[in-house]
Amino acid sequence: METVANFIHGECVTGAGQRIQAIFNPATGEQIRQVAMSTAQETQQAIAAAQQAFSGWSKQSPLKRARVMFRFKALLEENADRLARLISEEHGKVFSDAIGELTRGLEVVEFACGIPHLQKGEHSANVGTGVDSHSLMQPLGVCAGITPFNFPAMVPMWMFPIALATGNTFVLKPSEKDPSLALELARLLKQAGLPDGVFNVVQGDKEAVDVLLTDPRVQAVSFVGSTPIAQYIYETASAHGKRCQALGGAKNHCLLMPDADMEMATGAIMGAAFGAAGERCMALSVVVAVGDEAADDLCRRLEEQMASLRVGPGLDQAPENEMGPLISAAHRSKVLGYIDSGEEQGARLRVDGRGLRVKGHEQGYFVGPTLFDNVTPEMRIYREEIFGPVLSVVRVADYESGLQLINDHEYGNGAAIFTRDGGTARRFGEEVQAGMVGINVPIPVPMAFHSFGGWKRSIFGPLNVHGNDGVRFYTRMKTLTARWPDLQQDRGAAFSMPTLG
């Protein structure tokens, strides 16, 4: 059985830990690989390699670092199909969705290629008599990324391209559920010319994570995952003096106005709710429908489309399936439990995905698309992030009630509105308490040159990922104020507060 290795100082190193975790193909339920959970000592070795490499890498010209990113970009494009197949094999998402994930990660790499411009400081001449000031945006040192199973390529690439391009070194701890892609990225970075030790991969679980959070050599930690873990990551890293951006869970709502283009809205909601089997932090999981007429129309249309939704394995199907399996048997059981809960608490189960069986893949971790109507705020399926193909419809009387419902939820990752009215859309954009807002766009994930991040308990830390916030996160500013000797100036000591006037 193949064992997925660590990548330390430019070499694949099989972990010596005694705790082994199986890796499954979610479409078949069969074990395909295994991964050894790294010990604290192995994690420290990765940090040491990154620390040793930092001095040389940080002193490289930003232009030279950017050229490595350019070569890495080209290699990603050359290997896209192979990488996408690996994502589909270990995560379960359909191949075209895996290609889409790689593309969104690639866009951050392209953004990082412009780092010589992005890392520029500022200069002010003559801030005082004969005195100039200029600022530097310098790298931090060793940075760590802890990433989730749902995007094994894109989320790491939200982090490390900017971290590396700005002169930091990096230790990545990917999800133990689909860890192979991280190794492939490490190999491609080395092929692109990245010096040994600058990028390292440590496979593992909480034991490895806790080392990354507490080791004094690690300067910054980036995390994407559930809110309870994000809070733990943020509190622990901060308590140990580290910078931290920790992105948590979501319960993304869309407000469906009576004047919406129902055909467009239905198609958009279908894709956003059931794409990647709902395993997206930006999945649209709640429709807040204004008025019974809009709700009835939407539910009728959804039922029709859900009946023909193609569910099955993500690879080698013609035509390609639209939705794959969930990541694991345990997660499948959790999602089924949520459906049971919704039914028990009185929501109307209009489409039940619990009985789905995929021919030839009866052992796969499949759950069919599920639709609840008449959901109310006190229900578990409304309050908690399900992370599966379960869509809830909540009925409200008017815009104000819908907006209040969205703003009262503890999560504020994303929100969307479907309407033809520009005034309503503009008002929603200003009033909704969410970090990313879509106007007739169901998944408003910003492009790489903007920043991704939510509000409320969907994020811990002041800076979002990628875009200008990413550059700010992975650099610290230093401001130099300089005066050079001038024979005509008075060189006597000054004991009052310098005002530079």
Image (spheres, rainbow, N blue to C red):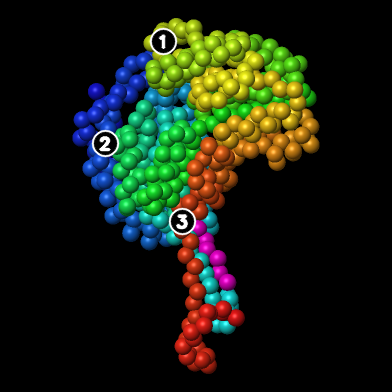
In the picture provided, is 389 more to the left or to the right than 228?
A: right
Provide the secondary structure element on which disc 2 rests: loop
What residue is pinned by disc 2? 38
Residue occupying image coordinates x 51% and y 14%: 341
Q: Earlier in the sequence, mark 1 or mark 3?
A: 1
Res 254 seen here: yes
What residue is pinned by disc 3? 475
Q: Nearer the viewer, residue 499 or 388?
A: 499
- Viewer-nearest of discs 1 and 3: 3
Q: Quadrant of the C terminus?
A: bottom right
User: Measured from the top left, where is residue 463 in percent x and y?
Assistant: 52, 48
In the picture provided, is 398 more to the left or to the right than 168?
A: right
Q: Which image quarter: residue 21?
A: top left
Under mark 2, the amino acid is Ser
What residue is pinned by disc 1? 361
Mark 3 crowd level (few <14, some 14–19, many ≥20, 10 Å Cα): many
Res 261 seen here: no
As measured in the structure, the alpha-carbon distance from the residue carrying label 1 to the one carrying label 3 is: 48 Å
- Is the C-beta separation of discs 2 and 1 under 8 Å? no
Q: Which image quarter: residue 394?
A: top right
Q: Nearer the viewer, residue 399 or 194?
A: 399
Under mark 1, the amino acid is His
